[in-house]
Image (spheres, rainbow, N blue to C red):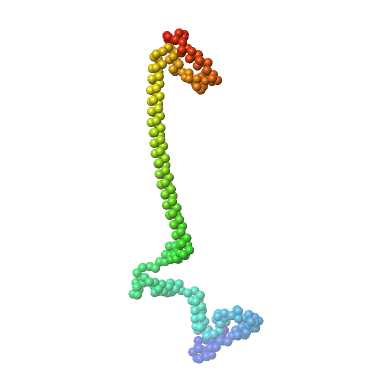
Amino acid sequence: MADRFPSLEDFDAGAQTDVKDTDGPSTDDFLAREKALLGEDANQFATSDDAVAFGTGDDDLLGGGGTSNIITEESTFESQFPDLANQNEVRCHLHLATTPGTIPGGGITAPSVSYNSGYGAYVEEEEEPAVIREWREQRDAQIEKRAQQFAAQREETVKEARENIDDFYNNYNAKKEKQIAQTRKEAEQFLSSREDTVSGGTSWERIAKLVDVSGKGSKGGASGSGKERFRELLVSLKKDEKAPGASGY
């Protein structure tokens, strides 16, 4: 142990402080053998910590030095795991610098909020082709023409219906008045004939006035009507003043 770790007095006297490895082969020999065994694959297993693990580089016995390896490790770690606080601060500065609502002095007028309404941007309508425009105009003209024809037909139908209704009531009233006059005339004739049948002559004469004995048609007792015998009997009774029942009751 004394040859590996010299005493403090030796340091003060300027003794040799090089450490000699007496336990085994050197690190360089070990690495050389490993590389020889692995061949071309040795580079796949090489890392930046090889020099630190085997005590190479500028490290001293007490762990000093090795600043290049430490700097390399820190830079690698920072690149892989950056500081979130720094990133947020940088993003905040970039956002404020690019936001229209910020003031050059650093104040913020309003937060920038992106709002998606769900509706697409307004797109100006394209001009309608001439063919479609002409077709649309023709269609509108035809629709208007049909509407006018329908209105004219409807007006004509209503007018004709009113005329027919007026004619119906006029004819009805005329026929009604004519029928009333005919009925009144017949009533007067009946009353006059009734008075005539109850006055003058024998009973058979008055009865003959109420019965048609003209001998014309079936009603008048024509031959072959079945009333011929009744007409002859009634006529003979009418002429005989002494016939039974001629003087009445």
Quadrant (top left, top right, bottom left, bottom right) of the C terminus: top left
* Pick the front one: 150 or 118: 150
Give percent across and percent down for residue 61: 53, 84
Quarter assignment of residue 119: bottom left
Indicate the position of residue 25 as horizontal and vertical percent values: 62, 84
140 is higher (above) or lower (below) than 174: below
Give the position of the N terminus as an image quadrant. bottom right
Q: Residue furthest front?
A: 239
Give residue 237's position: percent from left, percent from top. 47, 12
Is residue 170 visible in the rendered image? The answer is: yes
Residue 121 in view here: no
Write the residue at 39% across / 14% down. 199
> Extreme bottom residue here?
14
- 44 lies left or right of 159: right
The spot of residue 21 in percent (x, y) is: 59, 85
Q: How many marks?
A: 0
Which quadrant of the figure has residue 208?
Answer: top left
Residue 39 vs 183, above or below: the answer is below
Q: Which one is in front, 215 or 226? A: 215
> Residue at the right extreme?
37
Q: Quadrant of residue 101?
A: bottom left
Q: Residue at x 43, y 66 (%)?
A: 124
Residue depicted at 51% across the width and 80% down the height: 72
Residue at coordinates 40% horizontally, 34% vertically from top-left?
172
